[in-house]
Each structure stands twice: as structure tokens, then as C-alpha cells.
């Protein structure tokens, strides 16, 4: 069975290598982009791996860039916004993810610079809490997202260790891990029925 599958993949690649219509390659790229936005390198890798000829792949990519369908800077900006909203990570972790996606360093630097400026606030300084670092804010958001699960750990030391480990797994440097883990609530909130009746 594995041999039959290899043959069919090889046959498909041969058929795609024989394609000489740029519109076919352009359509294949457009289908790849239907699910989500991608970087130029991801599209190039996919089309080349599928078997299309390199000159047709480059032509399709150039056309998509001209049309604004492919834009590494916009892709990086959307990636960072998505990470900050749904799965906060450190700048270092985001930079590595974008590198693996094939986004050039200049685009990554620009977008992460915008992220740092936004975290610094409109006056260029720290926000009201004194935490103007984009990584610090992302770390605080990550802890807030996991607050309920951390509250189930009754021992304060273990709770802070888990918070630290969570932050470290998401690429935050040791100083931010230590500072933000130290802010994890001292005691879990008591429900109203367990509160002191005399208080």
C-alpha cells in the first residue's frame, strides 16, 4: 500500500510539473490561501513541493504580491495581533514563529516595533500600572487567561511555580517570568457563601 501511495504522489507531481499555464498555478496558490493568510515563503514552499515548475511558482507569487493578496508585512501584523489576543507569547517566541513562516527580518522588526510602541502607550512611556513592556503585558494576559486553572492549586508556591513554567514555555525571559508569576493571587477568591459572616 505505501508503494501505491508513493506512486500516486509521484504521478501527481509529474502532472503538475508538466503544467505550463500560469493561471493553473495561480489558482492553486489562491486555493491554498482560502483557509487562512500565509507568508510568501509558505506559498512558495507549498507550490514547489506540490511539483509546479519554479518559474511558474514565482510568476504566481509576483502576481499575488502585485494584487496585494500576499503581503508578508500584513501577514506578520495579523500573526502578532492574533497571538496577543488569543495565545500571548514573548517577542522572542513570535519572532521565531515568523522566521519559521519565512517572513523576512525587516518585516518582523517593523511589526514587533509597532507592538512595543503600542505597549508603551500614546506618551511613549509605561501604562498606568508601570508595565510598558509588550512582553510584560503579554505575560500578564497569558496569566489572566489561565487564572482559573492556577486558582485550583492551593499551595501558593506551587501556583507560582506553575505560572512561571507557563510563562517560560511561551518564551518569556526569566525576569518577566519571575515578576509576573509573583503577582499571581495570594489566595483564591472565596465564594460569597464561604466568606466570613461577621465581616
Image (cartoon, rainbow, N blue to C red):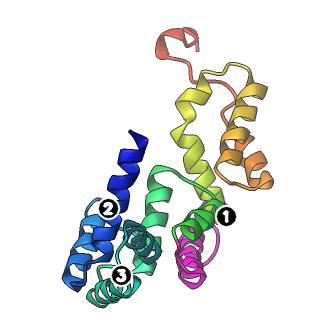
- Residue at 36%, 54% in the rendered image: 7
Report the Cα–Cα distance between label 1 and label 2: 41 Å
> Which contiguous range is marked in magenta?
102-131
* Pointer 3 or 1: first along the chain: 3
Crowd around label 3: few <14 · some 14–19 · many ≥20 (10 Å): many
Kindly identify the residue that appears in the image at 51 percent across and 41 percent down: 145
Marks 3/1: CA–CA distance: 31 Å
Task: Quickly name the residue at label 2.
Answer: 11
Please check the rendered image and state whether residue 5 is part of the magenta-colored stretch, yes or no: no
Q: Quadrant of residue 8?
A: bottom left
Residue 76 x %, y %: 47, 72
Which residue is denoted by mark 3 in the rendering? Answer: 57
The label number, if any, that marks residue 64 in the structure image? none
Give the position of the C terminus as an image quadrant: top right
- Circle number at residue 92: 1
Badge 3 marks a residue whose secondary structure is helix
Q: Is residue 106 magenta?
A: yes
Residue 189 is situated, as x and y percent measured from the top left of the image, at 57, 24
For the N terminus, give its image quadrant.
top left
Helix, strand, or loop for circle 2?
helix
Q: Nearer the viewer, mark 3 or mark 1?
A: 3
Q: Residues within 10 Å of mark 2 (few under 14, many from 20)?
A: few
Q: Is residue 9 visible?
A: yes
Placement of 112 over or under 11, stated as above or below: below
Count how many numbered circles sit on residues in the image: 3
Amino acid at each position: 500500500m505505501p508503494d501505491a501511495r508513493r506512486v500516486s504522489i509521484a504521478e501527481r507531481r509529474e502532472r503538475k510539473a508538466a503544467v505550463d499555464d500560469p493561471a493553473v498555478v495561480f489558482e492553486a496558490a489562491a486555493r491554498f490561501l482560502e483557509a487562512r493568510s500565509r507568508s510568501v515563503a509558505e506559498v512558495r514552499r507549498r507550490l514547489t513541493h506540490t511539483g509546479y515548475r519554479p518559474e511558474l511558482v514565482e510568476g504566481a507569487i509576483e502576481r499575488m504580491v502585485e494584487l496585494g493578496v500576499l503581503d508578508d508585512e500584513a501577514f506578520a501584523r495579523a500573526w502578532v495581533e492574533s497571538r496577543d489576543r488569543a495565545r500571548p507569547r514573548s517577542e522572542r517566541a513570535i519572532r521565531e514563529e515568523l522566521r519559521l513562516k519565512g517572513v523576512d527580518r525587516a518585516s518582523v522588526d517593523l511589526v514587533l516595533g509597532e507592538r512595543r510602541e503600542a505597549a508603551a502607550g500614546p506618551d511613549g512611556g509605561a501604562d498606568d500600572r508601570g508595565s510598558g513592556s509588550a512582553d510584560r503585558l503579554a505575560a500578564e494576559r497569558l496569566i489572566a487567561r489561565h487564572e482559573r486553572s492556577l486558582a485550583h492549586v492551593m499551595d501558593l508556591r506551587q501556583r507560582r511555580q506553575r505560572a512561571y513554567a507557563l510563562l517560560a514555555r511561551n518564551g518569556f525571559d526569566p525576569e518577566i517570568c519571575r515578576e509576573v508569576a509573583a503577582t499571581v493571587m495570594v489566595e483564591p477568591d472565596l465564594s460569597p457563601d464561604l466568606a466570613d459572616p461577621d465581616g
